[in-house]
Image: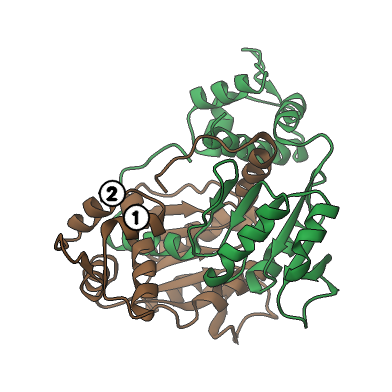
Chain colours: A brown, B green
């Protein structure tokens, strides 16, 4: 299953949660498509891939669909994540995710600044970076979030992967080198802002439907 | 020119700045490709598109290449941006960009919380959201950054576009509806984290070179 499909499933889930919270019980593929910014055919294909198909007359059952997507996306036993670099962005991410996902928790933060370590920041225990190997192993942390400056990102990635992390969400403006079995997603805010600025001036390019 | 090319040019620029700061004067396409995580052929194609071609023996001149990319990406007269939603993430972005890009400045922030408005936060003046139309027009702001909750994102986007914004960097987990001539880039941190968690568990999919 490609990372675009997984990304869309995550979007559908958020939309379905919103619908369920507003009391909506069923939804048609074209409605979900319109909210997600993709096509109805894509929605149907993606949802068949998680083993769910709606009835033509009433659409998809929102709760059943949430269960199917959850069974596909979430680890039944839960997953632990760690964040490295408790600057402004790191704090923002800790605050945003604190307690939000029962099956995916940021259980540890790390920083090299000893004024930040050995205390709780935004609900998360902050350890010295030297403890990455031990804390990641002890807590079976599989997911790493990197919010350190670019110059430190590779070293942090190496420590995380060395300790057993298998997927990294990287906010540092740096292309990380990792083994091919490690999944890295880079969110480069500067690059995105420069793209937006360019197309704000020159006009938007032809629209792609795929996320 | 596609948004992938613009994204890569922005990455090359950052890498070239790093090289120049370390005293490096010339660079080969394969070196730049390796640092950017793409192919040398892609680098050569992208740089020809901005009107620059290296000499086979010495590679690209770093300073000349920076000038060519800058002439392509930057507005000669500069561009102004505004950020709406001064929560944790908004503050992090203001702090990150403060004074960093001479040709692209966040000149105004907006929030609906009156404890935050009419003062300077992370070096940026914060106004009430009701003033978006006036402040955006008076400052010729073309770029909007949305860091409000999902439920408020569409209304904020409408206000920004109504006031003249042409490109939006959207951090709210919401698919914005805007006119086709408006460029929107959504950075959805939750979706990215869920993708990373999924592939950390299931193993990384086959690698794509394109960013």
B19 with respect to A153 (left or right): right
Disc sitting over residue A33 in the figure: 1
Q: Identify residue for label 2.
A: A42
Above or below, comparing residue B183 to residue B197 in the picture: above
Task: Point out the frontmost of discs 1 and 2.
Answer: 1
The chain letter under disc 2 is: A
B203 with respect to A185 (left or right): left
Disc sitting over residue A9 in the figure: none
Residue drawn at the location 61% of the way across and 40% of the way down: B11
Q: Quadrant of residue B147?
A: bottom right
In the rendered image, residue A71, in percent from the top left (x then y), is placed at 22, 70
The mark total stands at: 2
Can the viewer see residue A138 in this picture?
A: yes
Real-space Cα separation, disc 1 to disc 2, in angstroms: 8 Å
Outermost residue, front side: A57
B46 with respect to B123 (left or right): left
Query: Which mark is first along the chain, 2 or 1?
Result: 1
- As helix, strand or loop, the secondary structure at mark 2 comes to helix
- As helix, strand or loop, the secondary structure at mark 1 comes to helix
- To the question of a shared chain for discs 1 and 2, the answer is yes
Residue drawn at the location 46% of the way across and 63% of the way down: A160
Whether residues under marks 1 and 2 lie with C-beta atoms below 8 angstroms apart, the answer is yes
In the rendered image, residue B105, in percent from the top left (x then y), is placed at 79, 51
Label 2 crowd bin: few (<14), some (14–19), many (20+), radius 10 Å: some
Residue drawn at the location 67% of the way across and 69% of the way down: B85
Q: Quadrant of residue A31?
A: bottom left
**A110 or B187: nearer the eye?**
B187
In the rendered image, residue A92, in percent from the top left (x then y), is placed at 61, 72
């Amino acid at each position: 299953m490609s990372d675009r499909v997984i990304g869309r499933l995550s979007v559908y889930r958020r939309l379905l949660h919103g619908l369920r919270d507003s009391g909506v019980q069923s939804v048609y593929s074209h409605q979900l498509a319109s909210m997600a910014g993709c096509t109805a055919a894509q929605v149907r294909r993606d949802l068949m891939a998680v083993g769910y198909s709606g009835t033509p007359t009433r659409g998809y059952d929102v709760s059943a669909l949430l269960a199917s997507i959850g069974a596909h996306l979430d680890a039944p036993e839960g997953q632990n994540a760690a964040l490295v670099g408790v600057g402004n962005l790191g704090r923002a991410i800790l605050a945003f995710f604190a307690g939000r996902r029962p099956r995916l928790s940021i259980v540890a933060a790390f920083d090299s600044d000893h004024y930040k370590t050995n205390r709780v920041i935004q609900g998360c225990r902050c350890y010295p970076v030297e403890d990455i190997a031990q804390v990641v192993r002890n807590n079976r942390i599989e997911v790493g979030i990197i919010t350190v400056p670019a110059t430190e990102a590779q070293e942090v990635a190496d420590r995380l992967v060395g300790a057993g992390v298998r997927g990294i969400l990287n906010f540092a403006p740096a292309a990380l080198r990792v083994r091919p079995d490690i999944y890295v997603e880079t969110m480069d805010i500067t690059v995105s802002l420069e793209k937006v600025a360019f197309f704000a001036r020159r006009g938007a390019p032809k629209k792609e439907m795929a996320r």
